[in-house]
Amino acid sequence: MRTADVGGPLTLPRRADVVVVGAGNAALCSAITAVEAGASVVVLEKAPRDARGGNGAFTGGFLRFAFDGIEDLRSVVDLTAEEERLLEVGRYSPEDFFLDVAELCDYRSEPDLVDLLVSASLESVRWLRTQGVHFLPTLGLHAPDPAGVVRMRGVHPAVEVSGGGAGLLGALFRRAESIGLPIHYATAATRLVTDDAGRVTAVTVREGRVARTIEAGAVVLACGGFESDPELRARYLGTSWDLARVRGAAGNTGDGIRMARDVGAQAAGHWSGCHAAPLDLNAPLYGDRDLSDAFVRRSYHLGVLVNRDGERFLDEGADLEARTYSWVGQRIIEQPGQVAFQVFDARAAALLRPEYALRQATRLVADTVAELAAKAGVNAAALERTVDGFNAGTSGAAVDPRTIDGVATTAVSPPKSNWAASIVQPPFVAYPVTAGITFTFGGVRVDADAQVVAEDGEPIGNLCAAGEMVGGLFFGNYPTGCGIMAGTVFGRTAGRTAAALAASAT
């Protein structure tokens, strides 16, 4: 027996219309939607109750969606009079949203999947609000004009969940409890059962050491990628990825992908790609639920990023950090020891994101670059040469860290295309970082109804998938705010489809 949010001892049923595997954002959206469609639903969560929620528990809570002016924003956020005064909301069209995904993913994303993400984005945020999720406008992400007016045009996500991932999941779990949705914790799905026609008819699960089978009208797999399995990371992402830290849940070990592939699902997406951000070198191996996103270090664009040899290895100012941070970790893992150092002078240090000031931050401070190098274990002569060469290539122009400012270096390799301020004002500060993997991009192919597609191109009967295990959406990079949005859109789509499949089978 296990305890569920609906209260009391809970015994696994012999059958349900829809079985949902996972209990993160995508899974809960799927399960709640299926219940709203009239299906009997059971949710299987591999983690114990105090570790529930998958990667959703660790997200910062940003959502990217298409909107057409202030009225669309008002439909998801209760704006204060002061926020109304400060905001000038333009239009972030579906076409702009589509193009942002396409450009950042090198035009490899499957158009039908991006179309679904984009077209259902606003309606899905509105639906989340009806489920009790509270949103705030992202005023702090946008650069105000001299009068303090913030022009919102979609460069950054327009809203964030109040309370981040904890706020999102808290609302969805409360909604699940209010509708009597049974959630079985410490209950791992292990295998899909199919009939002679290849349709999924049941799920084998493990409660402790006991194996059971639940018959299902349809199954939704929404249990994450393989980012928490070191062996799979090394196999698919490459050398040294087994040493990466994980920003999120320890239980995302590719179970759903494996089960789907075992019944003939087609692999899709970027299997050697992932979302990986710069993470504090001394962050825990897996995400800390209490600190959530506090170990991410996203202000690298204000200084320089050097490796153990004291050398720069990328353009820190290639674009807004919201469009680059998810691949910077991929470059860090390639460096000696899988470590790098974000180096700032006193002027830049005053502009860093708030999490840099937390007591958990690994911080090195020195009055000279040579002293800083010694504390970091970096060759002092090499770091001084790098910083001096960088400074010589700067123009002295003032930088604006909140917008693309075009203040670039000259005759410096690699270049810095924006925010190229010299590093001259002591004390100097370095933050050691490594790669923190968020989620993997490889998964299984789904169609526009979120049904899993078989090797022959046809849907596998009664099987849907959502969330991070959907392959084909992101390649190499992704726009900030698309993670929760994709989980919500594909989760709801899978829930509707699964409920319809179960109803047609009865």
Image (cartoon, grey):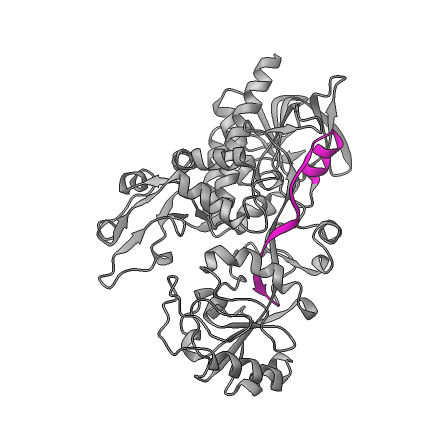
The image position of residue 213, as x and y in percent, is 73, 26
Query: Left or right of 19: which side holds 127?
Result: left
How many marks are shown on the rendered structure?
Answer: 0
Residue 75 vertical position relative to residue 154 in the rendered view, above or below? above
Q: Nearer the viewer, residue 321 or 111?
A: 111
Q: Nearer the viewer, residue 114 or 16?
A: 114
Q: For the point 46% across and 31% down, which residue is it?
A: 178
For the question of whether residue 133 can be seen, the reply is no
Q: Which residues are magenta?
A: 255-281
Quadrant position of residue 66: top left
Query: Left or right of 66: which side holds 480?
Result: right
- Quick one: quadrant of the N terminus? top right
The image position of residue 184, as x and y in percent, is 63, 34
Q: For the point 40% across and 74% down, which residue is it?
A: 350
Query: Left or right of 26: which side holds 45?
Result: right
Residue, far top: 506
- Quick one: quadrant of the C terminus? top right
